[in-house]
Image: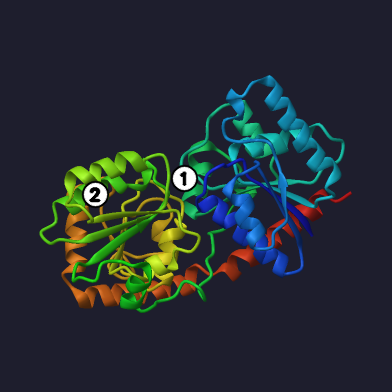
């Protein structure tokens, strides 16, 4: 099959990681896969590094504010991609490119079907335009978890036959347990006895970094916190950490091409997220055999079980988060057991091969449905 993935994002996060992982995996299976994204977007450079061909789509997230001329130019570019590309399936990952692909397709007499990947855990805007986009314009909508699928069907009345859940898979040959001391030395972390906890996530308020800093500030024991990721909240979080904790206790490492060494340096992984699908960073941490403290929101209970392969705390509850961190840091046997079972759960539920199998079948199905 010939497949085009599109993304209007100009930042870097889980949606872009999934897009590139899926594209590279399907190329390895013999398919012809291309990614289209805005010029200069991180996804373009990283996709090229994985051997995925990249085309430019002049459609960043601010397109709606860029004026009529910019919107017309973006739509024309999208229409050319769809009309001239000879693709069997279009896969839209972002809200702007979703609209562009849908409008481009609607303007052509013959065009490939659209599969919309709905990465967010929030509900969709209500109204006829949104309903058209997600029902009439898209052959299928793919969610990252059953929880999000159920929300779209139950709360928004979408046809459950056209919405499927395909959790994001990770490379469990890569994300595996490692030597903690060696990882810390390789990263140049201080050689002391402080426990090290960490979070991997875009610096957005919904991920709960501010809750983690508040929780750590009240711990009965000193710890070091590694924050891997970048985003709009960075300056505010750095200011919060400077005011709440001694210097050097929180390290903002920024976005990392490979987060595995950072995960392997941790005693525990903490993700106090407020709403989610199935976060890739949690799957990665589980694959690395880490004890994970997180919240039972969205699709997280689909891959982890409280007290068995993770420790759940109430979302938004700093005291509960603090108690959970203290509990796992104070009990080495509990950390080891949760980490071991987290790895087992990841092997069972988070395989990249399972994701590729399901997406490959889905693309073949929608392509066959639209064939003349």
Q: Residue at x 52, y 31 (%)?
A: 125
Query: What x and y, as percent, mark residue 363?
Result: 72, 57
Answer with mark 2 or mark 1, whichever residue precedes in sequence: 1
Q: Are marks 2 and 1 in contact (CB under 8 Å)?
A: no
Label of residue 326 in the image: none
Q: Classify 10 Å Cα crowding around label 2: few (below 14), some (14-19), many (20 and above).
A: many
In this rendering, would 83 be left or right of 346? right
Counting every numbered tag in the picture gives 2
Above or below 89: residue 111: above
Query: What x and y, as percent, mark residue 139?
Result: 70, 45
Q: Secondary structure at mark 2?
A: helix
Q: Quadrant of residue 74?
A: top right
Q: Nearer the viewer, residue 19 or 45?
A: 45
Q: Quadrant of residue 38?
A: top right
In this rendering, would 208 be left or right of 69? left
Q: Classify 10 Å Cα crowding around label 1: few (below 14), some (14-19), many (20 and above).
A: many
Q: Nearer the viewer, residue 276 or 280?
A: 280
Residue 145 visible in the displayed image: yes
In this rendering, would 175 be left or right of 55? left
Identify the residue position indicated by label 2 in the image: 213
Q: Residue at x 46, y 58 (%)?
A: 256
Query: What x and y, as percent, mark residue 67?
Result: 64, 21
Query: What x and y, as percent, mark residue 260?
Result: 44, 68
Identify the residue position indicated by label 1 in the image: 121
Q: Secondary structure at mark 1?
A: loop
Q: Residue at x 17, y 62 (%)?
A: 326
Above or below 367: residue 92: above
**Real-space Cα separation, disc 2 to disc 1, in angstroms:** 24 Å
| Quarter placement of the N terminus | bottom right
Residue 105 visible in the displayed image: no
């Amino acid at each position: 099959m010939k497949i085009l993935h599109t993304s209007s994002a100009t930042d870097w996060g889980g949606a872009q990681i999934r897009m590139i992982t899926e594209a590279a995996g399907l190329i390895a299976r013999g398919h012809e896969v291309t990614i289209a994204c805005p010029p200069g977007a991180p996804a373009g450079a990283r996709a090229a590094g994985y051997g995925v061909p990249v085309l430019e789509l002049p459609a960043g997230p601010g397109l709606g504010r860029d004026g009529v001329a910019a919107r017309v130019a973006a739509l024309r570019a999208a229409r050319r991609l769809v009309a001239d590309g000879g693709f069997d399936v279009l896969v839209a990952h972002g809200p702007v490119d979703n609209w562009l692909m849908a409008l481009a397709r609607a303007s052509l007499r013959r065009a490939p079907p659209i599969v919309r990947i709905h990465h967010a855990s929030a509900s969709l805007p209500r109204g006829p335009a949104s309903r058209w986009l997600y029902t009439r314009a898209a052959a299928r909508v793919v969610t990252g978890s059953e929880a999000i699928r159920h929300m779209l069907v139950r709360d928004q009345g979408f046809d459950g036959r056209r919405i499927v859940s395909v959790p994001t898979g990770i490379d469990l040959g890569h994300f595996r347990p490692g030597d903690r001391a060696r990882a810390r030395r390789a990263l140049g972390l201080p050689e002391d006895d402080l426990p090290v906890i960490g979070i991997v996530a875009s610096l957005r308020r919904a991920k709960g970094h501010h809750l983690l800093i508040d929780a750590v500030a009240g711990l009965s024991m000193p710890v070091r916190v590694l924050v891997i990721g970048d985003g709009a909240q960075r300056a505010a979080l750095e200011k919060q950490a400077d005011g709440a904790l001694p210097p050097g206790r929180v390290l903002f490492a920024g976005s990392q091409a490979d987060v595995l060494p950072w995960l392997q340096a941790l005693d525990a992984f903490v993700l106090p997220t407020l709403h989610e699908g199935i976060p890739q960073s949690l799957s990665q941490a589980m694959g690395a055999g880490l004890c994970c403290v997180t919240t039972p929101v969205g699709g997280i209970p689909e891959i982890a079980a409280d007290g068995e392969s993770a420790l759940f705390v109430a979302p938004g509850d700093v005291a509960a988060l603090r108690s959970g961190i203290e509990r796992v840091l104070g009990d080495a046997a509990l950390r080891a057991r949760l980490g071991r079972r987290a790895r087992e759960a990841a092997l069972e539920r988070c395989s990249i091969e399972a994701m590729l199998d399901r997406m490959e079948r889905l693309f073949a199905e929608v392509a066959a449905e639209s064939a003349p």
